[in-house]
Every structure is written in structure tokens, then in C-alpha cells.
Image (cartoon, coloured by chain):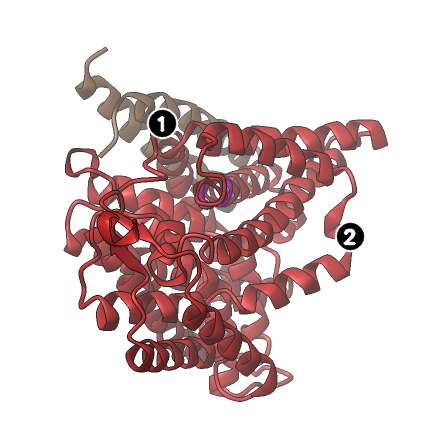
């Protein structure tokens, strides 16, 4: 079955709200967000954490909704959307960078899952290697099969994660002496409101600006695309961050899997870890396959994905989760991806007045340097200006610079076939 | 099997997951061990159900 990596998703292949949202919600449901929530709870009262989380996720939901409306209207993946602003070959640059970052995270998470399996079953180094390699392969199978397999995985995993989180939060609150005790706890250190908002935004700005397009292009109405974005970020990410905050405050450990293990709840810990990593990593590698289909146009998505999964499985053997430098590189590189959304939003709404033509009826110029310059300006801004919410700063800069350059240059990235000849 | 039956399986699996998770997390042993079992059965049943029906 095609996953429409080179074309728009046709009307008869659009899916229900729950089908589209399940994959996106499964992707967003991540232990790292819980750890961020626990980190905030150590520095501010729980009531303030709730306010911070709502403000940050409202911003993320708005950004994801805007990107989702574009992908719903066009039916294109994020990589195809970037072709309209960056040009045919220009779009391959952000596509490759995006794919490398996502593959890095996929490798780390697969290796970490295999490592935890090895620890749980007391495996020797050879067994650990097999567990890490197998993790990458098994998670990759869901991405290779495509959106239907990811839907089934998410439909099963999301309720399991929600119920286990609720159970853990109730148990933690009870062990700590009740909810009133938790809300009256005074943190030992402190953090400002906006830096805290920035931390929560940082948990999913990458996905809200880019990956969301790959899933919500299947939405059957504009309302479903927006509802899906809001449900994933304003509802689920808020739930996840607050669960982490409560468990972190009550148990003094930001990692919910550790907390469950500490309580002797091995099976819930294992189920939570498995469902959490599999849904996120499956959707992650699926998005990489779609994106690289824009780079290697003549190769099928499945062949690309088989190669990607094999490469990442090989690199799990180097235990990348132990290499702090890798985390640093991925987080740094991740900051320069959200500005791409600013360029696409400007190109779609301002330059093309909210209407992209059929990708197969037009030719694309090779590179639009206006987009490259805007992206570089926004990325430099992130590193030079250490003020406010960096991802938002970069997004606004890329939006403004791109709009300005395109308006004064009147450059056309797409031409009709006749014009191109 | 008809779609309706798959739907029942999916929903029954979710109910099992809810009961199993809360028993496993909140109850003392040996009840929590029974909760573990119900949680795993719920996962299996709902996987079966969602393989043939999706909302």
C-alpha cells in the first residue's frame, strides 16, 4: 500500500479523527516530557507548573494546528511542503538534516530499550547487543508497514499508557501523604515563568513544527486536523507533563519507569516503557522514510526504510545513549529545524495565498536561495540571541525574512511545464 | 469474524487494561499480580480487536 510520499493523500484515503489522532498522540506520549515536568516541579509549586504547562502547550497546539491545516488542505508530507519554498534540490537539504536528527533519536531510543531489556533479564554483552539490534528492527517494522500498523499500535498503547500513568500518579500521591501535601510542597530551588514555558515548548516544538504534517495530511476535514493537534498537545502533552510533575514531586524521581520499578511494579513499568518507546519510535522512523522519499525520488519508501532500519540497528551496537556528545549534537541540531515551519507558513499563506497547486502539474526550480538565507538567519538568531523562547524567536525570524525576501525579489519557485521548457 | 465482534474485543481489551493497570498499581500483592495478568490479557485482546476494527 502507498503512503502517498510523492503525492497528495486522495480524498477517499482520508481517515477518521481517531485514526489520525491516535498516531500523533502515540508519538507525543513520551517519557522525556514527564521528566521535563518533574524537573519543573522541583523548581516551582505544582499549581504554577499546571499554568506553565497550559500556556506552553497552547502555543504548541496553535503551531501544530497551523501546520496541520496546510497539510490537510494539500495532503502533502512535510518534505513535499518544503519543496514549494526551497525548490526541488533545495528541499533535500532540510529533508536530510531532519532525517539525520530523527534517525539519531531513533537509534538512541532503540538502544536504550534493548539495554533495559538486557538489565531486566540479566543478559551478557552478546545478549544485550542482540536485544538492542532486535529493538531497532522490531520498532522499524511498524514504520515500514506504514500508517495502518502505526494506528493499531497506537490504539492499543495509548489506553495502556494513560491507565498506568493514572495508577502511578494515584499511588505516588497516596504514598506522599495526599494531594494537599503535594500542592503545599515548597520547592528547594526556583525558575522563572518564561524559562519554564520554554522548557515545556522545547519538549515538542520539533514535532509540532514538522512531523505533525506527516500524520495530519490524512485528516478528512480542517476541523479534524485542528482537533487532532489540540488533543495531542494541549490535552495529552499537558497530561504527560503533569503526570511527570506529580510523580517527580511525590517520589523524588523524575523517571516514571524508575518509580514503578522502585515500587516493585515490574509489569506496568515494562508495559509503559514498551508502549511509550514503540509508538514514538515507530512514528519517528515512518516520518524519516517519508522525508527521505523526497531525497531519493526513484527509490520506494519501503526500500529506503529497510536500509534506514538496518543502519540504525547497526549503530545501536555502539550504545549511543552512553555518549553525551551525541545528545548535545542532536539537541543543538534540533533547534534549527523549527524555523523551517516559519518559512513554510509564510510561503503557503503569504506567498501562495493559502493554495498550493498540484505537485505533478508543475515544475520546481532547483534551489530557492531566499529560503536558504531565511533559514540561516533564523538559525543564527537562535545561537546569538539568548532571550525569550528561542524556538519561537527563530520561527518568527524565518517567517519575516522569507516573506521580505520573496516580496522584494518576486521569485517564483514553481513554473508550469511549458514555462520550465 | 464480523467488524462488530472486533469492536467488542477492542473495547473489552481496554476495560481489562483499565482494571488491570489500576489493580497492578494500587493494590497490594497478591492482588497486584492478578492486575498484572489482567493488564497483559487486556493488551492481547485489544490488539486482536484493533487489528479488525478501528474507530
Q: Quadrant of the N terminus of chain B?
A: top left
Instruction: Say left or right for A151 vs A337.
Output: left
Q: Position of residue A96 (x, y in %)?
A: 54, 51
Q: Which mark is residue A322?
A: 2
In the rendered structure, which segment of residues is drawn in magenta? Answer: A284-288
The residue shown at (45%, 69%) is A369
In front: A89, or A335?
A89
Q: What main secondary structure does the magenta stretch of the protein show?
A: helix
Q: Which chain is red?
A: A
Q: Which residue is found at the position 45% from the left and 30% from the top?
A: A300
Taking A69 as reference, is A338 above or below it? below
Q: Which residue position holds label 1?
A: B46
**Quarter in which the C terminus of chain B is drawn:** top left
Mark 1 Cα-neighbour bin, 10 Å: few <14, some 14–19, many ≥20: many
Verify whether residue A285 appears in magenta: yes
SS assignment at label 1: helix
Q: Residues within 10 Å of mark 2 (few under 14, many from 20)?
A: few
Q: Position of residue A331 (x, y in %)?
A: 62, 64
Chain B drawn colour: brown
| x, y percent for residue A106 | 59, 45
Q: Nearer the viewer, residue A244 or A212?
A: A212
Quadrant assignment, res A47? bottom left
Amino acid at each position: 500500500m502507498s503512503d502517498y510520499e510523492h503525492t497528495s493523500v486522495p480524498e477517499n484515503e482520508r481517515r477518521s479523527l481517531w485514526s489520525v489522532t491516535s498516531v500523533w498522540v502515540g508519538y507525543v506520549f513520551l517519557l522525556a516530557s514527564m521528566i521535563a515536568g518533574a524537573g519543573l516541579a522541583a523548581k516551582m509549586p505544582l499549581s504554577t507548573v499546571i499554568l506553565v504547562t497550559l500556556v506552553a502547550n497552547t502555543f504548541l497546539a496553535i503551531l501544530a494546528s497551523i501546520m496541520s491545516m496546510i497539510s490537510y488542505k494539500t495532503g502533502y508530507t512535510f518534505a513535499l511542503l518544503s519543496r514549494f519554498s526551497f525548490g526541488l534540490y533545495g528541499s533535500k537539504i532540510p529533508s536530510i538534516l531532519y532525517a539525520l536528527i530523527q534517525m539519531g533519536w531513533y537509534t538512541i531510543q532503540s538502544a536504550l530499550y534493548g539495554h533495559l531489556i538486557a538489565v531486566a533479564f540479566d543478559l551478557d554483552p552478546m545478549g544485550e547487543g542482540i536485544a538492542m539490534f532486535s529493538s531497532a528492527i522490531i520498532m522499524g517494522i511498524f514504520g515500514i508497514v506504514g500508517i495502518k500498523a502505526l494506528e493499531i499500535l497506537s490504539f492499543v498503547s495509548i489506553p495502556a499508557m494513560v491507565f498506568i500513568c493514572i495508577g502511578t500518579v494515584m499511588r505516588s500521591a497516596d504514598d506522599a501523604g495526599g494531594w494537599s501535601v503535594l500542592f503545599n510542597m515548597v520547592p528547594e530551588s526556583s525558575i522563572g515563568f518564561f524559562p519554564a514555558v520554554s522548557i515545556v515548548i522545547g519538549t515538542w516544538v520539533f514535532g509540532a513544527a514538522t512531523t505533525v504534517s506527516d500524520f495530519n495530511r490524512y485528516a478528512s476535514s480542517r476541523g479534524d486536523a485542528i482537533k487532532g493537534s489540540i488533543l495531542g498537545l494541549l490535552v495529552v502533552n499537558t497530561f504527560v507533563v503533569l503526570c511527570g510533575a506529580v510523580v517527580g514531586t511525590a517520589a523524588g524521581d523524575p523517571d516514571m519507569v524508575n518509580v514503578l520499578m522502585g515500587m516493585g511494579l515490574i509489569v506496568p513499568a515494562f508495559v509503559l516503557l514498551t508502549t511509550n518507546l514503540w509508538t514514538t519510535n515507530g512514528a519517528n522512523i515512518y516520518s524519516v522514510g517519508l522525508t527521505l522519499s523526497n531525497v531519493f525520488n526513484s527509490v520506494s519508501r519501503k526500500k529506503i526504510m529497510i536500509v534506514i532500519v538496518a543502519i540504525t540497528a547497526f549503530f545501536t551496537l555502539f550504545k549511543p545513549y552512553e555518549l553525551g556528545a551525541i545528545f548535545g549534537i542532536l539537541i543543538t541540531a534540533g533547534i534549527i529545524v523549527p524555523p523551517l515551519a516559519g518559512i513554510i507558513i509564510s510561503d503557503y499563506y503569504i506567498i501562495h495565498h493559502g493554495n498550493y497547486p498540484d505537485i505533478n502539474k508543475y515544475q520546481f526550480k532547483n534551489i530557492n536561495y531566499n529560503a536558504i538565507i531565511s533559514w540561516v538567519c533564523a538559525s543564527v538568531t537562535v545561537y546569538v540571541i539568548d532571550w525569550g523562547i528561542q524556538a519561537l524567536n527563530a520561527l518568527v525570524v524565518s517567517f519575516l525574512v522569507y516573506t521580505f525576501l520573496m516580496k522584494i525579489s518576486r521569485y517564483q519557485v514553481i513554473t508550469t511545464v511549458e514555462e520550465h521548457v | 469474524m464480523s467488524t462488530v465482534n472486533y469492536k467488542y474485543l477492542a473495547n473489552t481489551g481496554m476495560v481489562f487494561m483499565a482494571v488491570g493497570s489500576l489493580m497492578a498499581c494500587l493494590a497490594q500483592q497478591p492482588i497486584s499480580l492478578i492486575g498484572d495478568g489482567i493488564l497483559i490479557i487486556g493488551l492481547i485482546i485489544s490488539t486482536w480487536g484493533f487489528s479488525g476494527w478501528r474507530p
